Image (tube, rainbow, N blue to C red):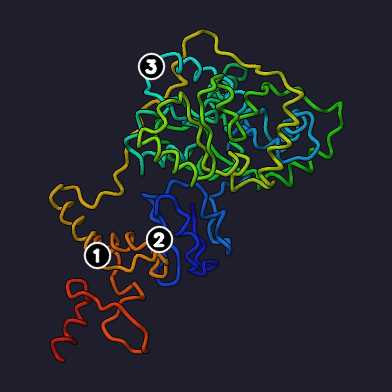
Amino acid sequence: MRLDEEKCKGCTNCIKHCPTGAIRVRRGKAYIIKERCIDCGECIRICPSHAKYAEKYPFDEINRYKYKIALPAPTLYGQFNNLTDTDIVLTALKRMGFDDVCEVSQAAEFISEATRIMLKGDRIPRPVISSACPAVVRLIRVRFPNLIGHVLDLNAPMEEAARIAREKALRETDYKNDDIGVFFITPCTAKITAIKSPICNIKSYVNGVFSIKDIYPVLLGNMEKLDAEETEELSKSGIIGVGWASSGGEASGVFTDRYLAADGIENVIKILEELEDEKLNDLDFIELNACPGGCVGGPLTVENPYVAKARLTRLRKYMPISCNHLPTKNIPKPLYWQKPLEPVSVMKLADNVREAMAKMKELNEIDAILPGLDCGTCGAPSCRDLAEDIVRGKASINDCVFFTSENTDGRDYIPIPAPFRKADDDKKDKKE
């Protein structure tokens, strides 16, 4: 996530919607606390000034490689009206300068089958949480570390598609690994971060990423120029794989009635809270998507998510159920994460337990005297967040507009308690 300070007006909309409290407004401008950010893109969606944006790769990045492969997310198919053949999109995408395309929906069908195999065992406690949405995985490691054991330790379809495409290129061409560039066409910001900073793999198989929004105009132009006889047969996925683009699509491919699918970051948090309270133990599988409607609602798409979902529903009528199956009943090792998911202790106040307890006591004392309105005027999402910032030395209680050392305009103010006053206020009291 990136911030354009010139566009930012300090309106505080973003701080109210960030699921991890990763944004503050100071001196009239927002800033992002990087270690807390899960790159869900909610701030991009909510910012009226368009001050938040995702980091971009220039398209000429593909020219660094001798053999270029595109990985289109299934969400891409929902961006076009009256589409009945995905090969049209894939052929047009290939003509943008790629030597090959590999559908992420193809890899999704492998992951769906692997998930079905996993659910037959009991290695992961129920309910099993999907690991497909990187924003949700990052949210769990930051806010819900107790649920890490429930997360499915399989690669996301994007990563598996990149591995399949790269190995195919190495088999069928004379190019070396460093000559091959694999580029993902993404609907969201979280997958950009998953590529640049993978948390459960040593290194991503993907070399770069382009947003659907950025490539859409050129891709649409290429599609309009295509003749029927020029369309190549490139599609290798079916209903299950393409279904991953919408909320509930992944879960329906698991073939169990004991599942739940939730989308939108606020709904995701509610489900995780209920799961933490052990209220959902009767379920086998939980699919969670940070974006509303699933990946079709990603901030880097061009179409309304409900329209895109309806288009994909129509498109899937022309497809087989699934075109891809694992070679054996055992899950291949490359489908698993290379390293375990670890919690991130960005919320702790100190490394030392005694010091952390002392700071928590101070935080609670400050929180108790704050007005509790959570108005955001101080630049923090809530009064408790301001109290935490004060304890961390990153804010002052004077940032709250309801506190002042003297009443200057006749309004009712809450007097600042002595322990939390600024030094100059204490000096002023002594003089008086």
Q: Residue at x 83, y 34 (%)?
A: 226
Going by the numbered disc 1, the residue's amino acid type is Ile
Q: Residue at x 62, y 20 (%)?
A: 173
User: Which residue in the structure is indicated by mark 3?
Assistant: 122
Q: Is residue 253 above or below residue 183?
A: above
Within-10-Å neighbours for mark 3: few <14, some 14–19, many 20+: few
Q: Earlier in the sequence, mark 1 or mark 2?
A: 1
Going by the numbered disc 2, the residue's amino acid type is Pro
Q: What element does badge 1 sit on? A: helix
Q: Earlier in the sequence, mark 3 or mark 1?
A: 3
Within-10-Å neighbours for mark 2: few <14, some 14–19, many 20+: many
Q: What element does badge 2 sit on? A: loop
User: Which residue in the structure is indicated by mark 1?
Assistant: 366
Going by the numbered disc 3, the residue's amino acid type is Asp
Q: Is residue 34 above or below residue 196?
A: below
Q: Is residue 246 above or below residue 362?
A: above
How far apart are labels 1 and 2 at the CA level? 15 Å
**201 or 281, which lies in front?**
281
Q: Quadrant of residue 211?
A: top right
Q: Residue at x 75, y 25 (%)?
A: 317
State which quarter of the image contains the C terminus: bottom left
Q: Quadrant of residue 296?
A: top right
Q: Earlier in the sequence, mark 2 or mark 3?
A: 3
Residue 108, percent from left and from top: 57, 25
User: Which residue in the structure is indicated by mark 2?
Assistant: 381
**155 or 96, which lies in front?**
155
Residue 183, percent from left and from top: 59, 35
How far apart are labels 2 and 3 at the CA level? 40 Å
